[in-house]
Image (cartoon, rainbow, N blue to C red):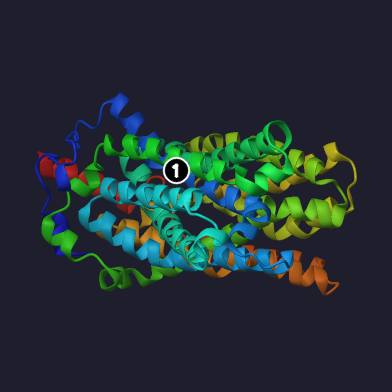
Amino acid sequence: MSSERGKRRGTVQDGPAGNPPAASPEVGPSAAARLRSLFGGSAGNLVEWYDWFIYASFALYFAPSFFPSGDRTTQLLNTSAIFALGFLMRPVGAWLLGVIADRRGRRTALVVSVSLMCLGSAMIALVPGHAAIGVAAPAVLVLARMLQGLSIGGEFGASATYLAEIAADDRRGFWGSFQYFTMMLGQLIALGLLVLLRYALLDEAQLAAWGWRIPFAVGAGLAIVVFYIRRRIIEAPAFVAESEAARRTTGIGELLRHRRTVLIVFAMAVGTNVCFYTYTTYMQKYLVGTTGFTVGQASLICAAAVAVFMFAQPLAGALSDRIGRKPLLLWFGVTGVLFTVPLMTAIGQEHRPVAAFVLVLAALFILVGTTSIGATVKAEMFPAEVRALGVGLPYGISTSIFSGSAEYIALWFKTSGHESRYFWYVTGCIAVSLTAFCFTPETRWRSQMIADSREAVQGSG
């Protein structure tokens, strides 16, 4: 640990770039300031998942505007390739915004992140089609998705770090769980808008002509709202208490001094990411392509299950504040290894909507053990000067490799006639995370973050 960590500021002062004053570590922020900051710290995930769902769902409608080839398959492949590019940009965003968060402040990184989200969505909403500006149209789409990939990549580490640092020690699991709560809320908002546009306001021709731009414009508007919220949040006391010299040391070199923790964080994310994409994103396609439900039935089943899953996040987070983080992590690892194959097999053979909903919800109930507290645990394992980078970069690399390829691997196994082998692949990824959980310390009562808080209080005395 850097020797500069002991050189704390006596009081919490204005942060960099004119940040509003934060309360001293000893007193802590007011309840109103804490709530506003916790909401601002997690709200970017809402925009992130809203954007993701909208791009994937409306690709069928906007693909001809950017790729005028008469071959629909080629058009969708082009938009899918650009979608995958967003995953490749995530590690870059995690590194860039992680360094900004550790050097310039968590609030600064969060403002930059949501600004990139807004810019990317606005570009897609406003760019003329190929018929008007030729190859510049797909070029702008590529640039927009790159910006959004940078934003999404940096958002996780910055927001997870901020939520963990701004929350009280005895409520950190609860407040940290709102990161995934807002992720799911963003997906449900996107689904609601999708249903409204498709079945109530516009017909297919209108959606293809101009209606697909509406959800991207809404995404830009949501990002603007979050931008103004984040400009008013306080800086995390743990960051403000760091010395200037300690902030200057942050970066890849300093992070590599914590190689063991980095490897644990990476391995923790492998099973979580693959399982999350399987049980949420791929599940709808699985219900339609394998089980035989209609698109409407599958959407309703998944939306209802995700809504329950969303509200389970803060409950599980609060539970971790009482019994510790590790029991929940082990719950996910053990039950995920034991029951993923049976559950996915049963879902594939189920033709009753209510029964399918119960089975999907059971799968998500397994997943809640890691989604509710995974980000908090990662933040609790790193010292303040590399916390955002340490949380975000290993996660971003894991997401780029495993999340980005999950659906492709699932479809590859299906087309080759061995769909069940994908379930074993998911199980293997969860086993990797389970191994990491065995080496993960219990961070509820003893963590780097609690030590930081105590040092900050001692320094203020």
Q: What percent of the width, then of the height, locates residue 105?
A: 24, 50
Would residue 184 be found to the left or right of residue 457 on screen?
right
- Most foreground residue, 132 or 243: 132
- The image quadrant where one finds the C terminus is top left
Classify 10 Å Cα crowding around label 1: few (below 14), some (14-19), many (20 and above): many
- Residue 287 in view here: yes
Q: Which residue is mark 1?
A: 220
Query: At label 1, which amino acid type do we have?
Result: Ala
- Residue 15 in view here: no
Q: Residue at x 39, y 62 (%)?
A: 93
Q: Residue at x 80, y 51 (%)?
A: 287
- Image quadrant in which you'd find residue 276: bottom right
- Most foreground residue, 215 or 371: 215
Q: What percent of the width, then of the height, locates residue 406?
A: 65, 65
Q: What percent of the width, then of the height, locates residue 150?
A: 41, 60
Mark 1 element type: helix
